[in-house]
Image: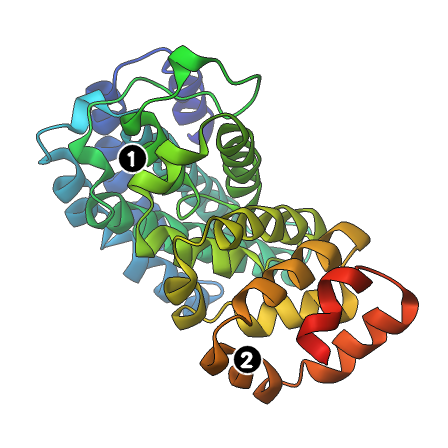
Amino acid sequence: MVEDYGAAAASFDASSTEEWLLHAQKLVPAAMSKAKEVKVFPVKWKMIISKLEQIPSRLSDLSSHPCFSKNALCKEQLQSVSKSLEEAIELAELCLKEKYEGKLRMQSDLDALAGKLDLNLKDCSLLIKTGVLGEATLPLMVSGSVQDSDVDFASIKELLARLQIGNLEAKQRALEKLYDVMKEDEKNVLAVLGRSNVAALVQLLTATSPRIREKAATVICILVESGSCENWLVSEGVLPPLIRLVESGSAAGKEKATVSLQRLSMSAETTRAIVGHGAVRPLIEVCQTGDSVSRLQPLVL
């Protein structure tokens, strides 16, 4: 029963990464077996089964890394995978008994499960590709104050990796922590910042959460003003989301977006791109309302 798996997971909270790996590996065949027994919603369960079938190879790739047991992200990822597998077992049991609160509700739950499994598969791959597992790091808290002893290259790399891994809430915590770290130690962050990290920040400018968009704009503004990665930002598509923030962002987001555009416009080529993306009208409107006038006038004149 799924209750047994859930109880086992609860007792695993303080377990090692290796124990979480074994736990996830045991859940995979159980989830597969249950899913294949289900007769209702065949299209959705077929899609879920195809994702479940990919999990063993991803777990194998993750566990074969020499730093597997030393990185907090691995344990967190295994916990997330286990939670998704437990949910698959639970939903399969409900479908087998046909004890669910309406077809539409169950279809929605199955779609959500498929999305979680997709995220698990993507994150397992990213953990290897980002290279963050090459650093043997201690767990990095993504809340609380920044202490000098907390910040080193390894933990900064782990924090940057968190911008690409996990759900939106986890990325928001990482983004807020990154902002705190940059206020204290901008030089070290810039020293380890890679193009994939810049791309992740640009993607967060289009997040559904206004808070995340605003904080991403703030961090990007710091990067732009540092003069260290303008080319990466532009090539990763930062201009359109910055312009959208000028048009409809919060007051703080609009301010940071306009400052970033002003700095990026120092390049003639980028200025042409800004104009080409339709930024003239929203920038003029900002000037007319008096927001950031002194910063924006050189850009729109």
17 vs 91: above or below? above
- Among numbered discs 1 and 2, the one appearing first in the sequence: 1
Q: Secondary structure at mark 1?
A: helix
Give the Cα separation between the discs numbered 1 and 2.
54 Å
Q: How many marks?
A: 2
**Who's the residue at 57% across and 63% down the image?**
263
Q: Is residue 40 visible?
A: yes
**Who's the residue at 68% across and 63% down the image?**
258
| Residue closest to the eye, 298 or 3 | 298
75 vs 294: above or below? above
**Who's the residue at 23% across and 19% down the image?**
19
Query: Which part of the image, by quadrant, shows the C terminus?
Result: bottom right
| 201 displayed left or right of 192 | right
**Who's the residue at 32% across and 23% down the image?**
152
Q: Residues within 10 Å of mark 1 (few under 14, many from 20)?
A: many
Frontmost of labels 1 and 2 is 2
Query: Which part of the image, by quadrant, shows the N terminus?
Result: top left
Q: Mark 1 highlights which residue?
A: 27
Q: Amino acid at mark 1?
A: Leu
Q: Is residue 99 visible?
A: no
Across and down, in percent, residue 109 comes to 57, 53
Q: Secondary structure at mark 2?
A: helix
Across and down, in percent, residue 290 comes to 89, 64
Q: Mark 2 highlights which residue?
A: 271
Q: Residues within 10 Å of mark 2 (few under 14, many from 20)?
A: some
Across and down, in percent, residue 94 comes to 53, 45
| Residue closest to the eye, 4 or 69 | 69
Across and down, in percent, residue 24 comes to 27, 32
Q: Amino acid at mark 2?
A: Thr
Outermost residue to the right: 289
24 vs 8: above or below? below
